[in-house]
Amino acid sequence: MAAVAGGIFQKGNGTGARRSETATAWVLRAAWLVLPLTIGPALADSLDSTATGLRTTASVGLWVLWSVGLLVTLIPHPVTLTVVRIGGPATTAAASWAAVTTEEPVGAVIAVAAGLIVGVGALSAPVGDLFVDGTSYGDERRFLLRGPGPVVLLLGPLAWVAILLGTITGPLLLADSRWIPGALACVIGFPTAALAVRAINQLTRRWVVLVPAGLVLHDHLALAEPTLLARSSISSVGPARPDTDALDLSQAAHGMALEVRCTEPHEMLPATRNTVAEVQSVHAFLFTPARPDALLAEATRRRLTVG
């Protein structure tokens, strides 16, 4: 079984995964670069009938979103990944609004298509892996972990809405000379948006690292502190077994969970809501990377037993 799995994942080795990340990132960058040409006309048409102050404020905000977004796509880092994953869907939302309100059907189609490319690219797993790996050093490789199931389905979208509404509502009301509602919206919205940004940023700081010494699981939601499993202590890494009794650290994430089996009991410090975490001795544990195939290919390249 291990030999078969190893052979399968060797075909899609780390080089292929790297190419996928680079290609997806450059598609995202190119799509973001031409946003003024693809979404700009539809947005301009939609804003044309609004009051001058409101139109100017919205235009400035859109140009800031475009310039900051383009810049951060060029800097792979967990922090810039947070910005990309907020700005990408925001671009999709702006494109959808423009498509609904513009009177140019062709422009509407182009805007929606461009917005979808940016939004999907920003949220894609290859881009996530590329950005979290931006802080790697030496011979290590980082892979982003999937967000917990409830967060991906509900809390994450709510946080994004809080960021969007908290950021734009106050300035737009003030631009429309609605001073009291605008001031209240700023006082409430900005701190709320900041808290939501912090929450999303925490999700981009969860990863598993393959290092020469073995494997590191860095997940503050599952562990009180990162854990290093020496390569000599790793029996195998592979898709979770249906009847596994491994410690589940996947946080109910959707997708394929991977199981790391140890040659001997390994001590871990699972995260807890209590003030004191208790050490557990485990023989196997589960986690869910965004791209399990890429991680297993890299594990094979590093001569870990995959299966």
Image (cartoon, grey):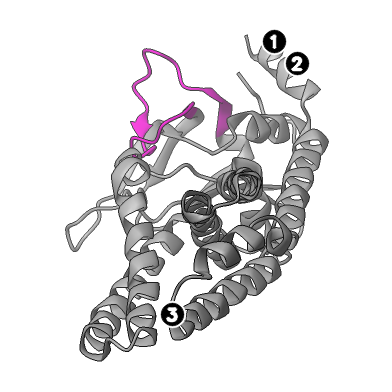
Circles 3, 2 touching at the beta carbon (< 8 Å) = no
Amino acid type of the residue that numbered disc 1 sits on in the rendered structure? Val
- Residue pictured at 64% horizontal, 28% vertical: 293
Can you tell which mark lies on residue 281?
none
Residue 50 is inside the magenta segment: no
Marks 3 and 2, how far apart at CA:
63 Å
Residue at the limit of the structure toward the left, as seen here: 274
- Residue pictured at 40% horizontal, 67% vertical: 197
Q: Which one is closest to the eye, mark 1 or mark 3?
A: 3
Write down the quadrant of residue 173 in the picture.
bottom left
Write down the quadrant of residue 43 in the picture.
bottom right
Q: Nearer the viewer, residue 182 or 297?
A: 182
Mark 2 closeness class: few <14, some 14–19, many ≥20 residues within 10 Å: some
Amino acid type of the residue that numbered disc 3 sits on in the rendered structure? Ala
Sequence-wise, which precedes: disc 3 or disc 2?
2
Q: Secondary structure at mark 3?
A: loop
Q: Secondary structure at mark 2?
A: helix
Which residue was labeled with disc 3? Answer: 51
Amino acid type of the residue that numbered disc 2 sits on in the rendered structure? Gly
Q: Nearer the viewer, residue 134 or 1?
A: 134
Q: Secondary structure at mark 1?
A: helix
Which residue was labeled with disc 1? Answer: 4
**Quarter the C terminus occupies:** top right
- Residue pictured at 55% horizontal, 58% vertical: 91
Which residues fall within the magenta stretch?
234-258
Side of 275 where 152 appears, left or right: right
- Compared to residue 83, the image places residue 182 above or below, namely below
- Residue pictured at 42% horizontal, 45% vertical: 147
Mark 1 closeness class: few <14, some 14–19, many ≥20 residues within 10 Å: few
Can you tell which mark lies on residue 7?
2
Sequence-wise, which precedes: disc 1 or disc 3?
1
